Amino acid sequence: MTETGAANGRHAIPDPAAAVLGLQPPSMDSRRDATLLGAPAKPVRVIVVAEGLLGEALCALLSGQPGVDIVGRAADAARALAAVRDVQPDVVLLELRGAGVDDSDLIRRIRGEAPNTRVLLLVAEQDAAAIYRALKAGAKGYVSRNASLAAVTKAIRGVYAGDVWVERRLIAEALWGPGAADAPEARRDARGSDTLTAREREILRLLAAGGTNRHIAEALFISEKTVKTHLNNIFRKLNVTRRLQAVLYAVRSGLSR
């Protein structure tokens, strides 16, 4: 496969690729589990943005997963933007480089080139401040390089479906950990939650648990339109404008438990 070319067909997962990522090649059981999870009817079209052998390994591993179609790979920002512009993928799996490198601008430019494309971060270290900046720039979630192959695949499907894929532990680190000084908006005072009604608190708790509008509506036996109305009221009362900000608030104030 060329650096921005589409993958052709499915092939076996090579052990060296798994070693690069620290992932285990999928067993028959994990393949069966992936099938049970239900691959989307339409494969999720993914561009991998990672350097060198890591990018090759990611493509090799993910191309064998049901419901995932690797449609391109890029090793740097310029090639990534060109591939996104040409292919308009469903998801960009972006290696968060860390070590003082801010990928926020690249994420914003990807979103500019392809507004419907979701960006999922692949992180090697739990750098809370860097991840928070990337999420604020428009990324829809992150997954660790130490995660299982099934977990990475699930994260790809999750962000494609509209979920925000963020670990609660990471949110807590962004709010209170060593990197919190670089993310001032995450350290919001807990005042304001007292103005929420019991129903709004319930909806906020479900939102923080990863629920979509449809899931929340089904759980509470209300319409999606009613959920949207409640969310608008929650955002107004908490002085936030995005779902992720509301989730951060819920964790900060203990409403997610």
Image: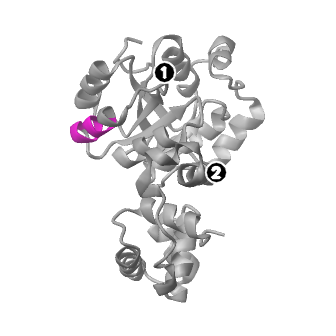
Question: Can you see residue 40?
Answer: no
Return the residue at label 1: 9
Q: How many marks?
A: 2
Identify the amino acid type marked 2: Arg
Q: Main secondary structure of the magenta part?
A: helix
Above-or-below relation of 96 to 195: above
Viewer-closest of 244 and 112: 244
Please tell me whether mark 1 or mark 2 is closer to you in this view.
Answer: 2
Q: Residue at x 37, y 79 (%)?
A: 225
* Residue in front for this viewpoint, 223 or 29: 223
Residue 165 image point, x, y percent: 52, 49
Q: Quadrant of the N terminus?
A: top left
Up-down: is 118 above or below 54? Answer: below
**What residue is shown at x 39% (from left), y 16% (from top)?**
75
Instruction: Tell me the crowding category of disc 1: few under 14, some 14 to 19, or many 20 or more residues within 10 angstroms, Cα based.
Output: few
Kind of residue indicated by mark 1: Gly
Q: Position of residue 38 (x, y in %)?
A: 59, 48
Q: Element under label 2?
A: helix
Q: Position of residue 164 (x, y in %)?
A: 48, 53
SS category of the residue bearing label 1: loop
Residue picked out by circle 2: 169
- Which x, y percent locates residue 219? 58, 77
Marks 1 and 2 sit apart, C-alpha to C-alpha, by: 37 Å
Which of the 4 quarters of the picture holds residue 244? bottom left
Q: Is residue 21 left or right of residue 122?
A: right
For the record, the magenta segment spans 107-113
Nearer the observer, 186 or 39: 186
